[in-house]
Image: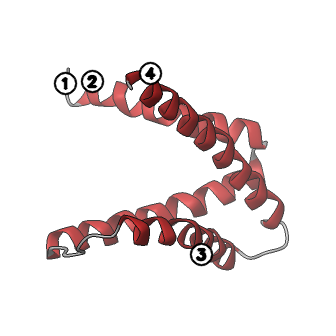
Amino acid sequence: MEQNCTLLGIGCLQRVGTRAPLGDALANILGQTVALGPLIFIRFAIQVIILAPMALAIGGTWHFSGKFLTLSAIRTVLQIKAMAIMVVALQYLPLADAVAIVFILPLLVILLGWAVLKED
């Protein structure tokens, strides 16, 4: 069973690793003719269309605390800003360079956490 979980994880990472740049490529193409606001709305709408059925299939109860909703709102605003910055960056950088920078950012965060916050 452990082997199946490993293969499932690899498959999920492959899907993310291919679909994320495809979304950026589409944003690059549409960014030349569509304004920034509608483009970000389209990206979020596509996410809702994909994720809403999955969330409904999971079921369960949906009770959120005020702190959770506040943190979710902050995360959403930051995600919108990140999408906007990526779309603007694609106007100045080639797609491959922009995607490479985005994929290396988690490693930079780890290094900054080690260097600045003295985390182990």
| Disc nearer the start of the sequence (2/4) | 4
Q: CA distance from mark 2 to mark 4?
A: 33 Å
| Disc nearer the start of the sequence (4/3) | 4
Q: CA distance from mark 3 to mark 1?
A: 40 Å
Q: Mark 4, mark 3: which one is toward the viewer? A: 4
Location of residue 89 in the rendering, given as x and y in whole percent from the top left corner: 67, 52
Write down the residue under mark 4.
3
| Residue at 38% in and 23% down | 2
Left or right of 59, for residue 31: right
Q: Mark 2, mark 4: which one is toward the viewer? A: 4
Q: Residues within 10 Å of mark 4 (few under 14, many from 20)?
A: few
Q: Residues within 10 Å of mark 3 (few under 14, many from 20)?
A: few
Q: CA distance from mark 1 to mark 2?
A: 5 Å
Establish if 89 lies above or below 78: above
Write down the residue under mark 1.
118
Write down the residue under mark 2.
114
Q: State the SS at label 2.
A: helix
Amino acid type for the residue under numbered disc 2 = Trp
Q: Are the two marked residues, 4 and 1, in contact with CB atoms closer than 8 angstroms?
A: no
| Disc nearer the start of the sequence (3/1) | 3
Q: In this rendering, does residue 77 appear at all?
A: no
Q: Are the two marked residues, 1 and 2, in contact with CB atoms closer than 8 angstroms?
A: yes
Residue closest to the eye, 67 or 108: 67
Q: CA distance from mark 4 to mark 1?
A: 36 Å
Q: CA distance from mark 4 to mark 3?
A: 35 Å
Establish if 55 lies above or below 108: below
